[in-house]
Amino acid sequence: KTASVRSIINELQEEQASGKLPEFNFIALNGMEMRSPFDSYVKFWEALSGTMKERLSAGAAAAKLEDFFGDGEKDNSDEDRSKKPITVLMLDEIDYLVTKKQTILYNFFDWPLRATSARLIVIGISNTINLPERLSLKLQSRLGGERCHFKSYTVDETVAILKTRLDGDASQVFDEDAIKFASRKTGNLSGDIRKAFHMCKVAAQNALDDYASGRRRIVEGSHPKVKISDVQRGSRDMYTSIIHKAISCSSSYEALVLIAIGALKKAKVGKDIVSLDVQEMLTKIESIANGSGEERYLSARLSLGDLLGILSRLGDAGILTLTTPKQSNHPWPLIQTSLEPYEINSSYRNTSHSKLAEKHLAEQRLF
């Protein structure tokens, strides 16, 4: 999605350079890169202020943006307004900018509608296909009606993309079965093409290490090749050790969320697929935090927006999956993970969160 928008912007910038289009400025912000959703005001104003790169507090930046796009400047005649360059803002991963009151997204999508002294176009990109329906009616009224849905890549499409990205003849580097396996594995897990690229990169590195160390020899008249066994080994490395490493490095709030997921899943033992509700997650997190006796957990008063942001980050890391509920009256995603409670517990061993994980996730012993 992001690559498609950037490709179109590049084409428009070429037309602008040749004089076919009027001047416009392109600014890209990524919600995932923000420490707080309010940092989006800071980053946007910093980019908008040009060479000055004026860095303000979130409140001051929001006021400047309101003045810039809102009613702050009086010189708002159509003639003067048309001479000013258009600002095209791409808001990537806007799921991370959802707050309890949803004021941040409301402002970003409201400014284009009432901009008087400058013109603004906002393009929002989300991994949640029904995000607009989950937002307040007030915010929905500010969203444009144009929507472009991107389906996950099929196995055949992933195979074609991987072959295209490989320089030269793909069959000279990868076995056909190896490419197909990486494509199917990616399709079954997430459909994210970046996962397939990374899987092939890890597999190629494994194969190169084997040839360099002498564990695998090159048959006379042939050349090194990545086989399906290399991709299988690479996928295991990606989705096991890397995930466990990511869990062990999680923050206090992320640890609370993961331990709460493990505790809820442990309580629902016997069920093949456990889907957790956001509301029961918030209740469990509060219960675990209050019973911890540690200030770093006790200070966690996660709002719905905070929890959704953490869940989205953990989902992007492949630690859990967010699914859209079938019931229309259920506005928020359901949470699933293939990790067992004991795996989450073992990932936190020898970390600062081991005591909390052991308390809620360890198997009960009779003696």
Image (cartoon, rainbow, N blue to C red):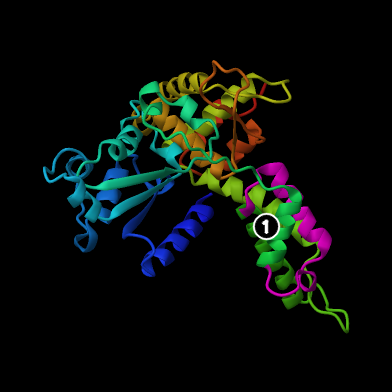
Q: Position of residue 200 (x, y in %)?
A: 69, 61
Q: Position of residue 317 (x, y in %)?
A: 56, 45
Task: Identify the image quadrant of residue 233.
Answer: bottom right
Report the magenta residues as a range.
Answer: 166-193
Nearer-the-camera pick, 32 or 365 = 32
Q: Position of residue 189 (x, y in %)?
A: 68, 43
Q: Position of residue 174 (x, y in %)?
A: 77, 67
The correct choice, above or below, for 364 with respect to 26 in the image is: above
Nearer-the-camera pick, 189 or 149 = 149
Q: Residue furthest right?
A: 220
**In this rendering, would 157 be left or right of 326?**
right
Does the stretch in magenta take in 181?
yes
| SS for callout 1 | helix
The correct choice, above or below, for 170 with respect to 302 in the image is: below
Q: Residue furthest front?
A: 79
Residue 341 visible: yes
The residue located at (66%, 66%) in the rendering is 165
Task: Identify the image quadrant of residue 217.
Answer: bottom right
**Mainly helix, strand or loop, the magenta region?**
helix
**In this rendering, would 321 be left or right of 67?**
right
The correct choice, above or below, for 366 with respect to 40 in the image is: above
Residue 302 visible: no
The residue under label 1 is: 199
Task: Identify the image quadrant of residue 320.
Answer: top right
Kind of residue indicated by mark 1: Met
Nearer-the-camera pick, 142 or 200 = 142
Question: Mark 1: few, some, or many residues within 10 Å (few <14, many ≥20)?
Answer: many
Q: Residue furthest bottom?
A: 221
